[in-house]
Amino acid sequence: MPDVSSEELLEHILHSISEDKAEDIVTIDLRGKSSMADYMVICSGRSTRQVSAISDKLKDRLKEDLGRSSKLEGKDQGDWVLIDTGDVIVHVFRPEVRAFYQLEKMWLPVGMPAPQA
């Protein structure tokens, strides 16, 4: 299966998490700012169960649709799951945990408001 561009991977990820009712989805362009990935996606799930389900389904869809393996961190707790897909890093939070860590503030350009949890 041919590899996809980081933009195509991002679109696939955004579609997957939207299908699973992720909330407050933010995409951050990391190109030129970090060598770890081209994009970061941050979103929320309403409960630990939804956070885990969004993460599991994303991992399964990427493997099934694109042949791409992903690494999951934090799924057992279900408060904050990090999915490393290579070119795109995805963070799925419970709203309270997202508000506490405020990742958007670290990565969004100055003056761009972060979504309210």
Image (cartoon, rainbow, N blue to C red):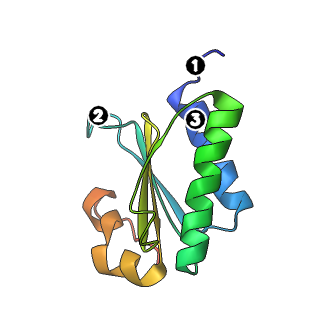
Q: Nearer the viewer, residue 55 or 103?
A: 55
User: For the residue carrying disc 1, how many other residues have a C-alpha within 10 Å: few (<14), some (14-19), or many (20+)?
Assistant: few
What's under tag 3, amino acid-wise?
Leu
Q: Position of residue 20 (x, y in %)?
A: 70, 63
What's under tag 2, amino acid-wise?
Gly
Disc 2 is placed on an element classified as loop
The residue sitting at 62% across, 35% down in the picture is: 63
Question: Which is nearer the N-term, disc 2 or disc 1?
Answer: 1
What's under tag 1, amino acid-wise?
Asp
Q: Residue furthest top?
A: 2
Q: Which residue bears the numbered disc 3?
A: 9
Disc 3 is placed on an element classified as helix
Mark seen at residue 3: 1
Q: Nearer the viewer, mark 2 or mark 1?
A: 1
Count of numbered circles in the view? 3
Q: Is residue 35 visible?
A: yes
Question: Which is nearer the N-term, disc 1 or disc 3?
Answer: 1
The residue sitting at 62% across, 27% down in the picture is: 67
Q: Which residue bears the numbered disc 2?
A: 32
Q: What distance separates the C-alpha of mark 2 from that of mark 1?
A: 22 Å
Asked if residue 115 is positioned above or below residue 53 in the image, the reply reads: below
Query: Pointers 2 and 1 in contact (CB under 8 A)?
Result: no
Q: Position of residue 117 (x, y in %)?
A: 47, 82
Taking 106 as reference, is 116 left or right?
right
